[in-house]
């Protein structure tokens, strides 16, 4: 009986350590071993991270830029060889494609959008977001093998009581002559650092009133050395490119400072920023949900407040 976290790519993605921390706690609760499957050419030093969370085996499988079809085949091959009882994914965009298909191939249940998981006797209990993040659901899984995809924004990293000494194993995972059924020939690329990696983010919503007023968000972000983001509402309205969307269906961020300008605070949006160390909210509706999450709040029209904040930030830079 074992728990395995599945990762892939050339680098460790954000949220991986949070997922590994959760996997470690779950494995201890179940009295199971913990393994970490790495597919691709990850060059990061993962041994220290694995040791902190009690990983027994780091299983490495070589693959050059594997697509979803190849990943599914390789993970299914791994599970057939090693027979883990809980198969975990850090819910990235790619994992949304891969996890359900792995479960279908193995003929086992799958739960997506999980944010908490624990053992209840022989069963697994998973709590998830549902209906775009507007409510929560609780699943009890009696099956002997389960696939769970975890949204890590609300998780905290907690080391195992005792570090492990992980053993690295090179594993051969045949993809079975898989031919990718689709290929990305072009994709929008944002310039500069990734929004997911930013330490300071200023995001705007419909409370700005118009697309022209979004410039205030950009200006404040520039003055305080941050990046700019957006709510799904204004992305859908065409004010901002989708690469700037923060939320359950956009970017999952973990900044030190998150400034929400004219954003109501729907749970779909908060799923992408609730892990921020400090949230500052600006909204003229004093009953807006965003104030429940904010450490600091300004009740006022953002069109009045933002120019003053920009002016103060600019003065502080000189």
Image (tube, rainbow, N blue to C red):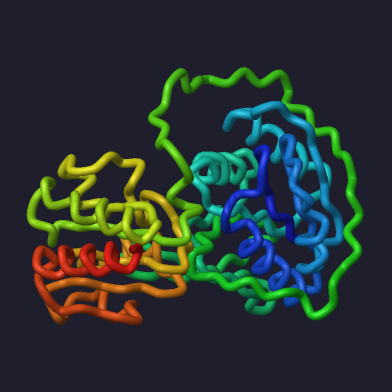
Q: Position of residue 219 (x, y in %)?
A: 25, 53
In the figure, residue 163 lies in which quadrant?
bottom right
Place of residue 65 in the rendered image (x, y in percent of width and height, measured from the top left): 65, 28
Q: Can residue 125 be seen in this snapshot?
A: no
Q: Quadrant of the C terminus?
A: bottom left
Q: In the displayed structure, would residue 121 be above or below residue 14?
A: below
Residue 52 place in picture, x, y as percent:
78, 68
x then y, percent, for residue 213: 12, 52
Residue at (35%, 54%) from the top-left corner?
246
Residue 27 quadrant? bottom right
Q: Return the residue nearer the eye: 24 or 125.
A: 24
Towards the viewer: 263 or 24: 263
| 228 relative position to 253: left or right | left
From the viewer's perspective, is 248 left or right of 288? right
Q: Is residue 299 above or below residue 67?
A: below
Image position of 224 (left or right of 6): left
Looking at the image, residue 192 lies above or below residue 270: above
**Residue 159 visible in rendering:** yes
Q: Which residue is depicted at the point 9% across and 70% down? A: 301
């Amino acid at each position: 009986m074992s728990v395995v976290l599945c990762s892939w790519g050339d680098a460790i993605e954000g949220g991986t350590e949070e997922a590994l921390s959760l996997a470690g706690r779950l494995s201890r609760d179940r009295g199971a071993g913990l393994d970490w499957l790495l597919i691709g050419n990850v060059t990061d030093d993962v041994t220290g991270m694995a040791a902190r969370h009690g990983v027994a085996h780091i299983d490495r499988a070589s693959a050059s830029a594997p697509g979803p079809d190849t990943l599914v085949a390789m993970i299914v091959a791994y599970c057939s060889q090693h027979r883990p009882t809980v198969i975990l994914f850090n819910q990235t965009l790619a994992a949304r494609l891969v996890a359900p298909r792995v479960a279908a191939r193995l003929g086992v249940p799958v739960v997506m959008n999980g944010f908490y998981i624990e053992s209840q006797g022989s069963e697994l209990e998973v709590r998830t977001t549902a209906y775009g993040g507007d409510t929560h659901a609780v699943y009890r899984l009696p099956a002997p093998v389960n696939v769970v995809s975890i949204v890590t924004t609300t998780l905290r990293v907690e080391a195992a009581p005792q570090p492990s000494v992980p053993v690295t194993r090179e594993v051969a995972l045949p993809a079975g002559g898989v031919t990718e059924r689709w290929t990305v020939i072009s994709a929008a690329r944002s310039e500069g650092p990734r929004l997911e990696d930013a330490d300071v983010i200023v995001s705007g919503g419909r409370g700005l009133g118009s697309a022209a007023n979004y410039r205030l968000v950009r200006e404040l972000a520039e003055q305080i050395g941050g990046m700019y983001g957006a709510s799904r509402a204004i992305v859908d309205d065409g004010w901002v490119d989708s690469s700037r969307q923060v939320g359950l269906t956009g970017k999952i961020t973990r900044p030190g400072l998150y400034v929400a300008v004219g954003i109501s605070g729907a749970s779909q949006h908060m799923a992408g920023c609730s892990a921020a160390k400090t949230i500052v909210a600006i909204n003229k509706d004093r009953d807006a949900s965003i104030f429940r999450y904010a450490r600091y709040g300004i009740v006022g029209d953002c069109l009045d407040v933002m120019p003053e904040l920009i002016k103060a930030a600019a003065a502080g830079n000189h």
